[in-house]
């Protein structure tokens, strides 16, 4: 087989993995922008999405679309509950305390998921069959199309929400300056809660649409969460195009690296990029340097 | 002097009787180390369940030579330090005459110096070949060596005149042991490993590695890992439309793999112990009787399918029973000597023949090659 054909396949595989990273990364970015917290429990929300849809499918015997919707709703509920129980009661929310809380929360969620659903890996049926489709020399599964489509819809809807709706604008105001936003009458706490709800629903969506390809278990959140975090960092923690490009870039580099160099370095690639970005361009690859907010 | 003869004789007779009587009343204490919780609980739990089940059954039938077995189980949680502590406790406090387990190779290697020093026979339920290679005086094992599974696949490839293979192994203990064996045995079968690639235990997409394999000279793919990786690979192979025969390791020989891989599992071949195909084995198979007994008992006791791991514990208990029954007494040294004389014991893992030079006791016939057909196992002739 020609090298160019192989590269086509690497690109297609990389883009589909990257789309998932992007979706998870945007969850990180939204919460960061509203609260300046890196929510390390984001990966667990991704896991909950997959596990809840499995639960609704197998235990409740619901049809797939209903199970997916309910799983997104349930995870959003979990995200809101998480904010209510762990972030809001904090008296002096220093960044360090918040980061530790989200890490603690992620371990707790993972533990509960393990107790409730066990340690087994589970499969979820593909949304529309598993007959491969060919695109030029590369092949993909119908599920990959679902991933591209749903990621695109989620990101566009997100963009519209933040650009045009009054709540979205209020959240952006919180991101720009919490104190000032509070002074003009924006309920900052409510906006923080919203940010958790939105990123939980995006995270769970990511968890659900990859589950038919990658399967799901109580501990899938760790790696997916870290990769999503990398995507968000590459994109400079922007809630929009930057993180999407960051995710896609990460997916493609991983795939090319595994195929052309060595698969042993696949995860190393992601983390080397993460470190390089943090050292050289902490503002992200795609944004201009900002002056420090005082 | 004559006056004393009668009392002394009486005393001696009485005490001798008391000793035998006492011995008859005391149970034989056997220790067990299983990782019932912790990451390797998928091994330890069925092992513990099976060991308890078999011991209860032996006791219900009157024990070994009229003496009951007292099984003392400690949970090692997959932790080598805990395994060593528990082994010391079994030997010094519980004063067991033999130990079954541990469940993993790492724990077994950690416990070996303890039992070697104390002189207590150990029957490990872990698969690593280094447990019994080189042979250690007090250490035996029941799980099949990885090398035997490799041999089984390579023999089949020879038969099909396939000489170029791609190997794709998981980057953990199980995968790297498999990778070593696959590479070490290749030359002897005239097989050439043209692609040698790995993947991480948590990786979710292996199309990159498989695309590379598709572009190579490989005529077959051998994947070495435990769930869920191999299921992802099976799906990726189907997605990429690769038509090469795909082999898996015995690490996925459970129904769980078929469930995870779904339609993509069809046609995959793997070496496996006989448990999963016990019902389709010909009646002439020497292990059939043991297998059917184990599977049926496990189903009755635990309402679950008996698996290979439980089988390793079943074999360990039955091997001990055999060694004690053959006479020589129940001292650790006598049990060890008798274990080494085990011949043609048809257990779950295979037919065991321990010798002074071989404490693993199995041949490649401990594995059968199975193919997944219609979401079930079929024997490959």
Image (spheres, coloured by chain):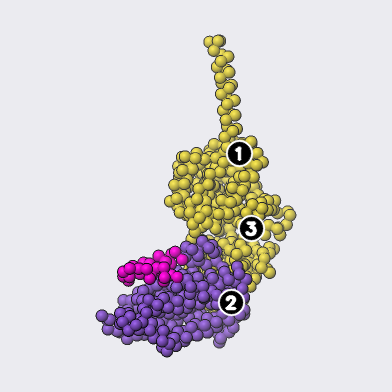
Chain colours: A purple, B yellow
Crowdedness near tag 3: few (<14), some (14–19) or many (≥20) residues, C-alpha within 10 Å: some
Q: Distance between the residues labelled 3 and 2?
A: 33 Å
Q: Name above or below for residue B106 compared with residue A129.
A: above
Q: Where is residue B305 in the image (x, y as percent from the top left)?
A: 64, 58
Residue at (63% x, 57% y) in the render: B304
Q: Position of residue A180 (x, y in %)?
A: 30, 82
Marks 1 and 3, Cα distance to the nearest angstrom? 28 Å
Task: Find numbered disc 1 in the image and state the secondary structure of the residue it sits on.
Answer: loop
Q: Which mark is residue B305?
A: 3
- Relative vertical location of residue A272 with respect to residue B62 in this rendering, above or below: below
Residue at numbered disc 1:
B68
Q: Nearer the viewer, residue B375 or B224?
A: B375
Could you tell me how far apart the alpha carbons at marks 2 and 1 are, in whole angstroms?
57 Å
Q: In which quarter of the image is residue B19?
A: top right
Q: Are marks 2 and 1 in contact (CB under 8 Å)?
A: no
The chain holding disc 3 is B
- Residue B247 lies left or right of residue A219; in this view the side is right
Instruction: Identify the residue position indicated by label 2 in the image.
Output: A66
Judging from the image, mark 2 belongs to the subunit labelled A
- Of labels 2 and 1, the one closer to you: 2
Residue placed most toward the observer, A118 or A261: A118
Magenta residue check for A96: yes
Point out the image quarter for the C terminus of chain A: bottom left
User: Which stretch appears magenta?
Assistant: A81-109
Which mark, residue B37? none
**In the depicted structure, whether residue A132 falls above or below residue B38:** below
Name the residue: 42% across, 66% down.
Answer: A105
């Amino acid at each position: 087989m020609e090298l160019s054909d192989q590269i086509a396949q690497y690109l297609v595989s990389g883009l589909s993995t990257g789309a998932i990273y992007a979706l998870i990364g945007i969850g990180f970015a939204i919460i960061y922008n509203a609260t300046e917290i890196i929510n390390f429990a984001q990966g667990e929300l991704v896991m909950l999405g997959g596990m809840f849809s499995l639960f609704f499918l197998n235990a409740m015997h619901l049809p797939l679309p209903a199970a997916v919707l309910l799983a997104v709703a349930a995870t959003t509920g979990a995200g809101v509950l998480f904010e209510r129980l762990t972030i809001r009661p904090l008296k002096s929310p220093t960044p360090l305390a918040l980061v530790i809380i989200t890490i603690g929360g992620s371990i707790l969620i993972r533990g509960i998921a393990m107790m409730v659903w066990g340690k087994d890996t589970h499969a979820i049926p593909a949304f529309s069959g598993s007959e491969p489709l060919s695109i030029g020399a590369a092949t993909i599964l119908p599920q990959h199309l679902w991933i591209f489509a749903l990621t695109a819809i989620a990101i566009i809807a997100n963009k519209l929400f933040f650009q045009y709706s009054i709540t979205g604008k209020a959240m952006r105001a919180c991101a720009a300056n919490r104190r000032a936003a509070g002074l003009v009458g924006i309920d900052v706490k409510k906006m923080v809660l919203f940010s958790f709800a939105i990123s939980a629903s995006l995270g769970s969506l990511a968890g659900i649409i990859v589950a038919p390809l990658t399967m799901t278990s109580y501990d899938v959140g760790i790696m997916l969460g870290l990769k999503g975090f990398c995507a968000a960092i590459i994109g400079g923690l922007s809630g929009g195009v930057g993180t999407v490009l960051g995710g896609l870039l990460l997916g493609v580099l991983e795939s090319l690296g595994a195929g052309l160099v060595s698969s042993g370095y696949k995860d190393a690639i992601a983390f080397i990029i993460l470190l390089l970005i943090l050292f050289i361009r902490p503002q992200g690859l795609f944004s201009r340097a900002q002056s420090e907010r005082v | 002097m004559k006056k004393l003869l009668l009392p002394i004789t009486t005393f001696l007779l009485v005490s001798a009787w008391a000793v035998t009587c006492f011995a008859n009343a005391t149970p034989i204490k056997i220790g067990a180390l299983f990782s019932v919780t912790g990451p390797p609980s998928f091994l330890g739990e069925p092992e513990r369940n099976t060991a308890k089940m078999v011991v209860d059954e032996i006791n219900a039938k009157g024990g070994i030579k009229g003496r009951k077995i007292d099984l003392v189980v400690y949970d090692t949680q997959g932790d080598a330090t805990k395994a060593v502590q528990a082994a010391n406790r079994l030997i010094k406090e519980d004063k067991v005459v033999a130990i079954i387990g541990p469940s993993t190779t790492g724990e077994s290697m950690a416990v070996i110096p303890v039992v070697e020093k104390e002189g207590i026979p150990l029957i490990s339920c872990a698969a690593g070949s280094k447990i019994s290679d080189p042979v250690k005086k007090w250490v035996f094992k029941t799980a099949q060596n990885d090398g035997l599974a490799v041999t089984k696949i390579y023999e089949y490839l020879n038969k099909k005149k396939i000489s170029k293979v791609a190997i794709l192994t998981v980057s953990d203990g199980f995968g790297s042991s498999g990778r070593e064996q696959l590479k070490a045995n290749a030359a002897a079968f005239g097989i050439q490993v043209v692609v040698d690639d790995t993947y991480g235990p948590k990786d979710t997409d292996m199309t990159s590695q498989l695309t590379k394999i598709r572009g190579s000279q490989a005529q077959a793919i051998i994947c070495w890992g435990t769930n869920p990786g191999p299921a992802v690979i099976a799906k990726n192979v189907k997605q990429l439309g690769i038509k090469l025969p795909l082999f898996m390791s015995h690490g996925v020989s459970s129904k769980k793999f078929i469930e995870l891989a779904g339609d993509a599992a069809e046609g995959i071949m793997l070496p496996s112990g006989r448990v999963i195909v016990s019902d389709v084995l010909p009646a002439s198979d020497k292990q059939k009787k043991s297998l059917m007994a184990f599977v049926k008992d496990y189903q009755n006791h635990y309402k679950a399918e008996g698996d290979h791991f439980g089988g390793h514990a079943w074999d360990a208990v039955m091997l001990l029973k055999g060694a004690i029954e053959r006479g020589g007494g129940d001292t650790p040294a006598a049990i060890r000597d008798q274990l080494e004389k085990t011949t043609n014991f048809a257990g779950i893992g295979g037919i065991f023949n321990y010798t002074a030079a071989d404490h693993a006791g199995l041949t490649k016939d401990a594995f059968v090659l199975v193919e997944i057909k219609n979401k079930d196992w079929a024997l490959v002739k």
